Image (cartoon, grey):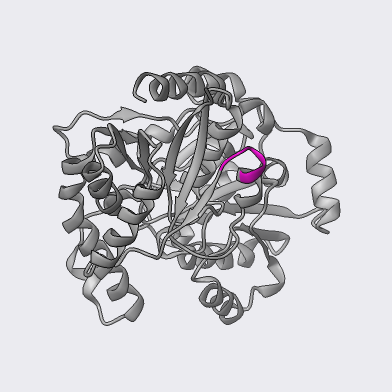
Amino acid sequence: MGPIRVLQIFTIMNRGGAESMIMNYYRNIDRDKVQFDFLVHRKGNAAFDDEIKSLGGKIYIMDPINPFFPKEYYHKLRIFFNEHKGYTIVHSHLNTFSSFPLKIAKEFNIPCRIAHAHTAFENIKLRNFVPNKENITETIKKLIKFRLRKKVSTYATHRFSCGEKAGQWLFGKKNDFYTMNNAIDTKKFVYNPDTDTKYRKELNLEGKVLIGHVGRLNNAKNHSYLLRIFANILEKRPDCILVLVGNGELQQAIEQEIDDLGIQDQVKMLGVRSDISELLQMMDIFVFPSFYEGLPVTLIEAQAAGLKILASDTITQEVKLTDDIEFVSIQKSTSFWVHRIFDILPYKKQDNSDKIAKAGYDIGSNTEKIQNFYLNNK
């Protein structure tokens, strides 16, 4: 008898926070006992596809979910479950859209149906309706998500979350949910001066002050504000470089804003990378002014790397595992952020791996917990 197979449901397996989190667990789980397969909703090769296949996982592709006309999606998903009858655990990471696959999983009497919260949206305010196409589009998306979230618990047998704030947003304050920590291999991120030197040399960044950011190029990450902070930094310290890691739908707009600000020679856009732990070694400070998040794994990783962090105060305080992170309002002026950055620099990086592990975010103990959950609920 082989391992139980858990169907993990995502949009696409690129290097996002939730995707990186589940891959951390996948690499460390006993795959003789528990194996992951993936149902995704976007065609094309994704960053983790080859690794998933090398670990023994299967990848199935469905058409995107249309929340207004879901009948075609339901029809195709029924065909899928008729052809793949062995699944007893479905673990959906689609936030509010989890209601769609979990509804059909319930029809097929799949006994363990997990809805996993990864994001906590801020309430929609009047300023969201300013005459700006990007803002209106994002606001409409949020309205749909606010409407759909009530349905998720109807079809889920178990509720998971990356943290308290995300869980309460998706499931409501009165709902019980299990917190599955965005755990990492802490030892992998410990600061190594040799790695720092090597990467600076390879990227021709020797002698520079490196302002770092890792995150998808989308509306939530607030890159426009970050770029304005950095432009202000350059007025005082022209020896600084902004290092952006990630890609996304706003890449062209962000590149245009970089050009408009005249800072193209001081911004290093590295795209999607598999060597995040090494890239963090060379950064001097990590700036993360997101509009909203769940509990971002990248901030766990940055703390493990001993980086000082300035993050927006919209992000849950649960992510504060060390004294190296400070929360600042994105309602403050960019010059306020700049002053805080210069107040912090320079400093000596510390080994925070024991603090991260003590706080419950080391991958070893967390993998054992989720493995036991799957085995006990198959």
Q: What x and y, as percent, mark residue 61?
A: 47, 58
Nearest the eye: 276 or 45: 45
Name above or below for residue 75 compared with residue 117: below
x 57%, y 41%: residue = 57
Nearest the eye: 155 or 96: 155
Q: What x and y, as percent, mark residue 153?
A: 19, 41
* Residue 121 seen in render: no
x 70%, y 46%: residue = 275
Quarter of the rendering containing residue 258: bottom right
x 33%, y 63%: residue = 65
Quarter of the rendering containing residue 241: bottom right
> In which quadrant of the rendered image does the C terminus lie?
top left
- Left or right of 314? Residue 308 is right
x 23%, y 69%: residue = 69
Q: What x and y, as percent, mark residue 201?
A: 86, 52
Q: What x and y, as percent, mark residue 205?
A: 79, 56
- Left or right of 149? Residue 306 is right
Q: In the rendered structure, which segment of residues is drawn in magenta? A: 53-57
Magenta-span inclusion, residue 107? no
Q: Give the main secondary structure of the magenta stretch.
A: loop
* Residue 154 seen in render: yes
Nearest the eye: 339 or 248: 248
- Left or right of 373? Residue 59 is right
Q: How many marks?
A: 0
Name above or below for residue 191 compared with residue 207: above
